[in-house]
Amino acid sequence: MSQPIIQMREIEKHFGSVIALAGVSVDVHAGECHCLLGDNGAGKSTFIKTMSGVHKPTHGEILFEGQAMHFADPRDAISAGIATVHQHLAMIPLMSVSRNFFMGNEPIKSIGPLKLFDHEYANRVTMEEMRKMGINLRGPDQAVGTLSGGERQTVAIARAVHFGAKVLILDEPTSALGVRQTANVLATIDKVRKQGIAVVFITHNVRHALAVGDRFTVLNRGKTLGTALKGEISPEELQDLMAGGQELAQLEGSLGGTV
Amino acid sequence: MSQATQAVGSDERVKQISSLRKALIRPELGGMCGTVIVFVLFFIFAGDSGMFNAQGVMNWTTVSAQFMIIAVGACLLMIAGEFDLSIGSMIGFAGMMIAIFGVTLGWPMWAAILITFALCLAIGALNGYIVVRTGLPSFIVTLAFLFILRGFTIFLPQLIERKTIIGGIRDAAEGDWLAPIFGGKILTGLFQWFGDMGIIATFTRGTKQGQPVVEGIPMLVVWALFLVFVGHFILTRTQFGNWIFASGGDAESARNSGVPVNKVKICMFMFTAFGAAVFAACQVMEFGSAGADRGLLKEFEAIIAVVIGGALLTGGYGSVIGAALGALIFGVVQQGLFFAGVESSLFRVFLGVILLFAVILNTYIRRIITGER
Amino acid sequence: MKSVIKTIALATTVAATPLMVATTASAAGEKYILVSHAPDSDSWWNTIKNGIALAGEQLDVEVEYRNPPTGDLADMARIIEQAAASGPDGIITTLADFDVLSGPIRAAVDQGIDVIIMNSGTPEQVREVGALMFVGQPEYDAGYAAGLRAKGDGIGSFVCVNHVISNTVVAERCRGFADGLGIDLGSQMIDAGQDPAEIKNRVQAYLNANPETDAVLTLGPTSADPTKLALEEMGLAGDIYFGTFDLGDEIVKGIKDGIIQWGIDQQPFLQAYMPVVVLTNYDRYGVLPGNNINSGPGFVTKDGLTKVEEFAGKYR
C-alpha cells in the first residue's frame, strides 16, 4: 500500500468549552473509499470541515501527500485537490446543469478585452462528464431542479472530479435518497474510486458503508475507535461501535434486530 | 455539443416536457406576450387618440425608458437575491445633490454630476455591505435607507436654501460637456427632416414654429437601451453573470463553490444605485430643477416592472430583457390607459391585477423548473 | 397560459372602459384636460374634480382630470406632454414648479393648444409660458385684503402662524396681511412646524410673551386647528381676533362658534370651473376676458356658513 494521501493525526477541535473532536487520527488512501461512520453529534461534520479547510484544528496536524498543510480557507483546500460535496449540494435548482457544473470555475473565452462565459465549452463538457457517470441529460440547459436527488449527487460528484479532486469528501450523500437512487450514488462512488481518487464517505448507514467501503472508521463522541479494513468487521460490530456499545444492543434486542 | 444532443435524443425522458412548456420557462416569454397583447389592444382602443403619433410614441417611450433605467439594476439585484427599496429615495437624493453641488455651491456641472455618482455608488455599496455583513434582509436595510435618503433630500435644501425645490440647473449646465450626456437629445437633424417632410407634426406657432414636435431621441432613452444591453450581456454571457444567478439561487451553495457572493451582491447594490443616479441626472437635466419629492414610489415601480418581466422575487431567476419588456408594458399601460380614456385612478387597479398575475405565473414557472409539486 | 391570463385581464379592463368614459365625459366636441400637481391623497383637490365635472356637464364638453399619483412634479410634466399629444382643445394646469413645467406647457401652447394656469403661479410666469390667463388666488393680494378688513375691525398687531415656512408663496399671505394693516411684519410670523402639539405650544408661548397681540392669523387647517385649541386652553377663544386661510371642518365649526372671525376661501371650485367656461367660450365664440380671474379671497363669516356646510368637500 502506498503512502496515504491524507493523514489526520490526533486532531482536536474545541468550540469554546465544547470539545467537538478529542484526538482523531485517520489515514485516507488514494483509490479507496474510506467510510466515516457515526451517529448524529458524533463529530463527523466537524471532522470533515477540518479536513476541507473550513475549520482549523485546535491541536494535531494534517499531512497532505506527506506534507503538513495549513489551509487558510476552503478555496485553498479545493485548489489543493480536496473537494467536498456537502449535504446540501452546492447545486442551485433554478440554474441549468451546465451553469451549475461550472459555478465558481466558469470557462472564459476572451474576445478582446471582454471575458465571456464560454457556454459552448461548458455545455459540451457537462454533457460528456454526465454521460461518463451514466446520466443522460435532456440538454445542458436543463435545470438542476428537475433532476432527482441521486442525479444531483452525481452532478456534484462529477463536477468535483472534473475539477481535479484527488480527495472527494461526500457528506451523507445517501441520507435523503430512496433505494434506487442510493444504488446509483453508490455505483458512482465506485466509479470515482476506480479512477484513483480517494473518497471519504460520511454516513450513518452501515449497509451503505459496507456496500462500497474499503476502510471503516467509527466516530463516537468526538473520538475514534480505530479503523477497520473491509472484511475485518461485521455490520453488527459497526452498529454497536456507532452507538457506543451497550444501549443499542439492548434496544436492538427489543426491536428484533432490525435497526 | 451536437453529438451529445443526439446521444441524448434516445433518452426516454425527452418527450416529457412539451415544447410549449419548454417555451414557457423562458423568463422573458411572458413579457413578450404581454407586450404584443398590450400593443394590439391599445392599437384597437386608442389607435386614433394620438397615442401612436410621433408625440404620443415619444411620450410612452420616455416613460418606459425611465422605468427601464431603474428596472435593469433592480432586476440584476433581484436575481442576485436582494431588494433595494431605496431606489426612489436615491433618485430624489441624487437629483438634489446635483442641484446643491451645481447650483447652490456653483461647482461646474460635470463635477457635480461625477461627485453625485460617486456618492450614490458609495451609498449603494454601504447598503450592500450592511446587508451581507449583518445578514439582515435587504428589505429592512434598504427600507431604512428609503427614509434616511428621503430625509436628507428634504433636510439639506431646506437647511441651505430654505426651500425644497432647487431650480436653475439648466442654466448652470449651459455649455457643460457632461450634462448633454444626460439631458441632451440625439438624431435631432433626422427629426427635423421628418418634420420638414411632413412625416411628423411641427409646431404651428411660438418660438419653435416649424420645428418638429419631437425634437429627437432623448438621452434618457439611449441610456435605457444601453443599460439593458449591458445588463443582459453581463448576466447571460459573462462569468460574473453566472455568479449573479448563483448568489441569488442559493448563496450558501454558491459560496461553497467558490463564488464571491458578498462581492457580487455589493456590486449589484452599486449597479442599482448607478441606475437611480442616471435616472436622476436625466431628470434634473431635462426639467432643470430638483425637488425633494422626486422619485416617490419609484422603487416599487422598478420591482413591479422586474416581476412582470418574469424574475422571481426569491432570486436566482430572471432576465434583463424580460425586465425591460416589463418596463415597456408598465409605461405603455400607464400612458395608454389615459389615451384610451380610462379614468386615471383605475391605473392602479390595472397595475395590481397585472402584478398579481405575473407573480402567480412566476410561481408556476418555478414549479416547472424545479419540479416542485 | 400567460397569454390567456393577460387577455382576460386586459379584456376586463377594456370592457369596462366605455362605462368609465361615460362617467367622465359627455362628449360634445371640445375636450379639456386639467392636470394638477396634487397626489392622490390630497382631498382638497376633490372640489376641483367636481368643479370641472360640473362645468363639463353644464357646457356639454368633455373634461378630464389628471394628476401624478405621488405628487411627483416630474411625472406631472410627462402628463402634460401626454395631454398635449392627445390633442385636446385646451389644457388647464398649475405652475407648481416653473422650471419643471414651463417646458411642456410652452410646447403645448406652441402646438396650438390653449392653456390656462390655475391655482399656482404668478402672473409674470403665466405670461412667460404663453398661457391665456391665470385663475387663482394671488396670495399677497388675498393677505392684503384680509389685512384691510382686520384694520377696519380695529386690529393693530398680530401673529402669523406659518406651518409651511419653506413655502415662500404661502408666506406672502402674512406679508400681505401686515401691509394691509399698515404695519411692519417684523418678527410677527412664527415658524410653527407641522406637528399639532408643537404648533399649539408655540402659539401659547408667543401669546404669553406678547400679551398685547390683537389678532392671530393661521395659514390653513394644519395650523388653524391647533391654534384654536391653544386659544381655548388659554381662555382667549372668542376674545382674540382670529382669522385663517382655507377652510376645513374645525375652521367652519370655529366660525360658527364665534371663535374664528373669518376664513379666507380661495374657492377651488372656481379655479376649476372658470377655466372650462372661459376655454369653451373662447373656442366657441372667440371671447376671452381681458384679465386674470381671482378666485379668492372669498371671506367666509358666520353669515355665509349654511352654503359652506352644505357643500363642504364637494364644491366648497
Image (spheres, coloured by chain):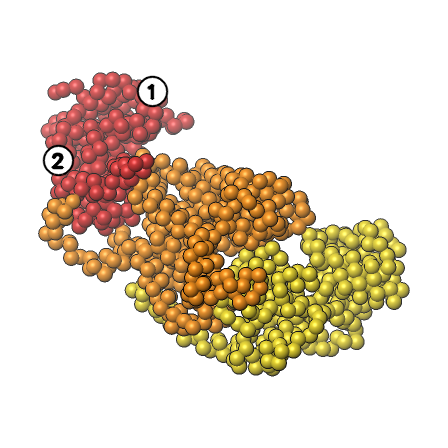
Residue at image coords 55%, 39%: B111
- Density class for disc 2 (Cα within 10 Å; few <14, some 14-19, many ≥20) is some
Q: Which hue belongs to chain C?
A: yellow
Q: Is residue B60 left or right of residue B260?
A: right
Q: Is residue A8 left or right of residue A58?
A: left
State the orange chain. Answer: B
Q: Residue B48: name its quadrant.
A: bottom left
Rendered residue at 12%/35% (across/down): A191
Towards the viewer: C82 or C165 = C82
Q: Which amino acid lies under the numbered mark 2 shown in the image of this protein?
A: Lys
Crowd rating for badge 1 (residues with CA inside 10 Å; few <14, some 14–19, many 20+): some
* Front label number (1 vs 2): 2
What chain is tagged by disc 2?
Answer: A
Q: Which residue is mark 2?
A: A191
Q: Colour of chain A?
A: red
Classify residue A184 as left or right of residue B146.
left
The answer to the question of whether label 1 and label 2 lie on touching residues, with beta carbons closer than 8 A, is no
| Residue A59: mark | 1
Residue B9 spot, x, y in % from top left: 12, 51
Q: Name which quarter of the figure residue A87 lies in.
A: top left
Residue ID at (45%, 69%): B50
